[in-house]
Amino acid sequence: MLKVAAIIHQSKDKVWDSFTNADHITKWNFAHPSWCCPKSSVDLRVGGEMNNRMEAVDGSMGFDLKAKFDVVNPCVQLDYTLEDGRKVTCSFEEENGSVTLTQCFDPEKENPEEMQTQGWQAILNNFKNYTEQL
């Protein structure tokens, strides 16, 4: 598994809401300003599904990132399985008014692991920057 993390200077409730609420996800879920997340749907329950549409801003390419939730423990842990069978674990640890969000994920086979880690970290950094402004 690969791992990325960020310390978010915000309450645990706001971090959780920003991470799991489709209205927020569309505002931070991209690795680079040339991409966007125009649509998101989240059925936040074990067995529920998530679908985030990822697109190049110029419309030249895009894909749906789909997953099914395996563990939903509000403000503590969120685990899901991506459509291709890869697992993702997200943990939320509060300390001194901040939250460390750690994501561990199975790599895909098409891109180098370093590139994948950089991309996931860039998205998490966007999440941090967005959430700290709430």
Image (cartoon, rainbow, N blue to C red):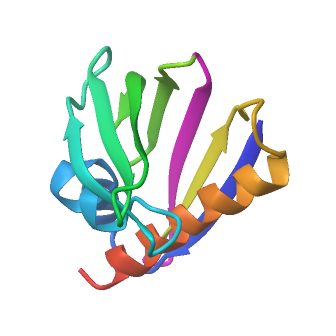
Given residues 11 and 56, the one toward you in this image is 56
When the figure is inspected, residue 110 is found, relative to residue 87, above or below; the finding is below
Is residue 74 among what the camera can see?
no
Is 111 or 99 nearer to us in this picture?
111
Residue at image point 52% right, 63% down: 123
Number of numbered callouts drawn:
0
Judge left or right: residue 134 versus residue 80.
Answer: left
20 in relation to 87, above or below: below
Q: Does the magenta portion include 11? A: no
Is the N terminus in the top left, top right, bottom left or bottom right quadrant? Answer: top right
Where does residue 13 sit, x and y in percent of width and height?
27, 60
For the point 44% across and 45% down, the residue is 76
- Horizontal and vertical percent position of residue 117: 73, 54
Residue drawn at point x = 50 percent, y = 78 percent: 96
In the image, farthest residue toward the bottom: 133
Instruction: Give the magenta range.
Output: 85-98
Spot occupied by residue 129 in the image (x, y as percentages of width and height): 42, 80
Quarter-of-image position of residue 111? top right
Residue at 58%, 16% (x, y): give it.
85
Looking at the image, can residue 129 be seen? Answer: yes
**Where residue 46 sits in the image (x, y, percent)?**
32, 18
Q: Nearer the viewer, residue 83 or 88?
A: 83
| Majority secondary structure in the magenta region | strand
The one of 126 and 96 positioned closer to us in this rendering: 126
As drawn, is 17 to the left or to the right of 63? Answer: left
* Horizontal relation, residue 100 to residue 72: left or right: right
